């Protein structure tokens, strides 16, 4: 599903050719995700929406009573994907892709507060995507995968 019928018009096709952000509109809606880390599985939900008046998408992640936010955009000037993760404890991280990264698979690396985190987004279909996290927690390497489905 592409939100608001963006893929249905010639103008939308032309815009998506120059603006990869429109390609991400398939994310809009409710997703159920499972996360596997260290052999342990947890689940959460994510609700993606377009941020009014701007070029951002917002994902609100909920697990139990905890909630976090992910903000995603494509910087047309630098041709880079940018992600801002806002955590419930007040911490945050900023991740940036290499220049010209495909919207099909977006590999990002943190630039704030340090460069120890890597996250890869991979679209599997219009109803499924995968996130792979590779980072350090208290000096120890951590790797986990999340699978999200509509």
Image: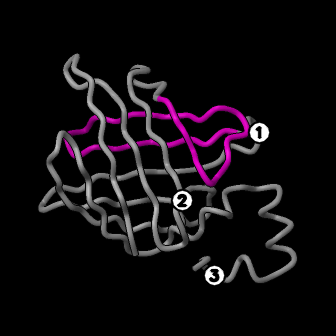
The residue sitting at 50% across, 71% down in the picture is: 28
The residue sitting at 65% across, 48% down in the picture is: 74
Disc 2 on helix, strand or loop?
strand
Which residue occupies the foreground of this view, 73 or 132?
132
Q: Residue 37, image x and y in percent?
A: 22, 43
Disc 1 on helix, strand or loop?
loop
The residue sitting at 46% across, 61% down in the picture is: 129
- How far apart, in angstroms, are the residues tagged by discs 2 and 3? 19 Å
* Nearer to us: label 2 or label 3: 2
Classify 45 as above or below 4.
above
Which residue is disc 2 drawn over?
123
Magenta highlight: main SS: strand
In the image, taking residue 124 as reference, residue 115 lies left or right, namely left
Specify which label sits upstream in the sequence, 1 or 3: 3
Crowd around label 3: few <14 · some 14–19 · many ≥20 (10 Å): few
Q: Residue 45, image x and y in percent?
A: 28, 66
The numbered dot on residue 137 is: none
- How far apart, in angstroms, are the residues tagged by discs 1 and 3? 25 Å
Which residue is disc 1 drawn over?
77
Q: Residue 26, image x and y in percent?
A: 57, 70
Q: Is the C terminus in the top left, top right, bottom left or bottom right quadrant? A: bottom left
Disc 3 on helix, strand or loop?
helix
Which residue is disc 3 drawn over?
4
State yes or no: discs 1 and 3 in contact (Cβ < 8 Å). Answer: no
Per the image, is 101 magenta?
yes
Specify which label sits upstream in the sequence, 1 or 2: 1
Crowd around label 2: few <14 · some 14–19 · many ≥20 (10 Å): some
Q: Which residues are magenta?
A: 80-109
In the image, taking residue 14 as reference, residue 77 lies left or right, namely left
Which residue occupies the foreground of this view, 89 or 29?
29
Crowd around label 1: few <14 · some 14–19 · many ≥20 (10 Å): few
- How far apart, in angstroms, are the residues tagged by discs 1 and 2? 24 Å
């Amino acid at each position: 599903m592409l939100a608001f019928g963006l893929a249905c018009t010639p103008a939308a096709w032309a815009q998506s050719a120059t603006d990869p952000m429109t390609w991400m509109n398939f994310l809009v809606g409710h997703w159920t995700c499972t996360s596997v880390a260290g052999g342990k599985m947890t689940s959460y939900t994510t609700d993606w929406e377009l941020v009014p008046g701007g070029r951002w998408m917002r994902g609100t992640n909920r697990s139990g009573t905890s909630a976090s936010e992910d903000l995603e955009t494509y910087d047309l000037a630098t041709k880079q994907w940018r992600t801002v993760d806002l955590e419930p404890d007040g911490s945050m991280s900023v991740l940036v892709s290499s220049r010209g990264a495909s919207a099909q698979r977006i590999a990002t690396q943190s630039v704030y507060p340090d460069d120890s985190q890597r996250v890869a987004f991979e679209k599997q279909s219009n109803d499924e995507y995968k996130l792979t996290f590779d980072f350090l927690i208290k000096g120890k390497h951590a790797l986990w995968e999340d699978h999200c489905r509509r």
